Structures are given as C-alpha cells and as structure tokens.
Image (spheres, rainbow, N blue to C red):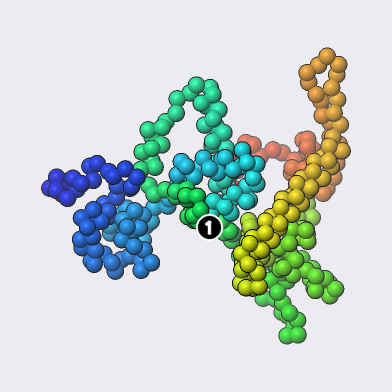
Amino acid sequence: MFDWLNGPGAELKHHIPGSTNYVTQLRNRRGGENSSESSGRRDDAESVGDYGLKSPFPLNPQFVSEPILSEELSNEIYKRVVEQKKSVRSVSVEMRVDMRRVGAVVRLKELEKRMKNEGKSMAVPYSRAIHEMVPTTPLAEKGEFQPVHESINDLPVHRLTAPQIFYPVSESRQFTRVDAGRVFSAAPALEHGEKATVNVETLIAPEQRRYEKVGKGDEEQQVLLPADARIPHPQLIALERDKLSHSMERREYTERYQERLKQSEKLEQERKRIAKEKAEKRLTRLQPENSRFEFRFKDVVVSKETTGPDGRGHIAPGQRYGVPTYDRKKGQVKIPTKVEV
C-alpha cells in the first residue's frame, strides 16, 4: 500500500482546482494510459473524462457520483426567484432543476443571508472543499444552453397502481388512460357524454383540469389522473407537440409556451385567492381594545364524517368520549414513517 502511495498515488496528494480527486482520474492525468483495459466497463456514451469525474471506484464503474449545484447556479436560482419574481415552475424549467430543489435553494440562501446579517461565521472552507470533492453542475454562459442537473418531470409510483386489476371491457369501447385511472381509484365510469370532453389533452390544460374525489371520511381520495396530468410540468408536453408538428417556428411555439405558463400561474393565483377568502369567511376575528392579541374563532362540526368511523378523525377537534389515547400504548409507532409530496 505504501509503495502505491509513494508511487502512482502520490499524484492524488494535491488535487487539481475545479476537478474531483478520484482514483479513476489517474489514467486521465497520465494521458489516457491503460484506457483500453477499462473501456469494456464503461458505457459507450461516456467519455474518458466523464468516467473519471463521476466514477470514484475503479472496480465499481456502475456507481456514479451525483453532481451538486455550483455556487454560481445556486445564486442564479435565488436571484430569479426572489429578485426577478419568477415562479418556481419557470425557474425549474430554465435551470433544469427540480422544483423541490429550487425551493430548498431559496430557503437555504435566505438562511445564509440571515446568518450574515446576524454576524455569524460561515463555513466557507468546508463548502469549497465539498464542491471540490464531488462533481458540480455549472451555470451556463450567456447564450449557451444550461446543462441538465436532474430530471424535472419524474413521478413516484402511485400506491393505487400497485395492485393488478383485471377489468373486463367490451371490444367496441375505447379504453384510455383516463379510464384506467378511474378503475384504479374505484371511481364510477364516465358518462357517455363526458367521454368526448375528458381526455389526456383536456386534463393537461390548466383551465380545464378537474379534481374529482371518491370515498367518504378517511377513505376519501382523489381520482387518479393520467401521468401526463400529474407530472410537475405538464405544459412541456404541449411544447414538445408543437416542436414535432413542424408547422411553426421556434419563436412561435416559445411564445405559446410562455402564454400557457402565464395562464397556469394566473389560475393558480386565483385558486389560492378563492381558498383564502373561503377560509376568512369561516373565521371570526376579535381583538379587544388596547390589546396586542387577536382571538380567532372558527366553527367546527363534530359528526361521523369529521370524527371518522373510529372516532379519531383529525378534522374535528377535542377529546372523544370513550376513545382512549394511544400515547402510552405499547407497540404504537409515534414517528413519521413516510413523507407525502
């Protein structure tokens, strides 16, 4: 081991700034020696440089280091969301970063800004060391395409699609993905008149998107929509269709995409405004004179629908007579076991 550390491994003692310091990069530093021996282990689409930058273990080429956001890219995301007032959805598409990561970057940058204002020290050397140890996604120069950091339209496997269902359908009926989602959700079939209006194309459009629920009480759930309508960026599907149609120029379908995006944001703001107004109507505010406190009263309904069949529903507040608490019961898991996104 010491012979290797004093011999070929001595090149790894000091890393090259702006690059990772993996063992697999020794071949690249020597000018690509023995590259033919490891070519069979690599993917044909990867170059020698990419292999050394992303694969830290020579004997395990299947393991690839996932890149992190560079400091310049994180600052650009924060600038577009906070200063330029762009939506998280549009910034996610422009920067090729998932919407959840965009939100995390904005929150962390706000925390960093607050710590600087409070005079707290920052772990800048640690941050620089981490950025030198793993691959990073850089910010593209002006006029160039932004490199893809991660997939922004991935969907987790929905729990309703886990069981295998045998659903008999007549040969004359056109069974679509919309119908399959209703079968998985145990929802009644669409009426004959709705079949022509409810399809994948209409569900993608934000102004025609419908949210239907089935079940009662704790068993209430939303009807499963097709994957095209559940992905984070459904407007990208319409953009790709415009590109494949070859009937319009790039400027034209880009304008149509921006128009769809603005319309979607406008409808989302309207939906939030209506929900806020409904919540305010159900709330009674009372603030006594010369008091800095404000009391808020909300009418609640304690019924079978709100308490649930077992009396433990979370919608209706208060203790339930005859329903003991599970706080001290043996074998009860009191920590979160899953995260619903």
Q: Which residue is nearer to you in this view: 73 or 280?
A: 73
Q: Is residue 273 left or right of residue 136?
A: right
Pick out the residue farthest to the bottom.
171
Judge whether 243 appears above or below 80 on screen.
Answer: below
Circle 1 SS class: loop
Judge whether 101 appears above or below 50 on screen.
Answer: above
- The residue at 41%/36% (across/down) is 127
The image shows residue 179 at horizontal and vertical percentages of: 73, 71
The image quadrant of residue 253 is bottom right
- Kindly identify which residue carries mark 1: 151
- The residue at 34%/62% (across/down) is 47
Judge whether 237 appears above or below 70 on screen.
Answer: below
The image shows residue 65 at horizontal and vertical percentages of: 39, 52
The image quadrant of residue 169 is bottom right
The image shows residue 256 at horizontal and vertical percentages of: 69, 61
Q: Is residue 319 left or right of residue 112?
A: right
**What's under tag 1, amino acid-wise?**
Ser
The image quadrant of residue 294 is top right
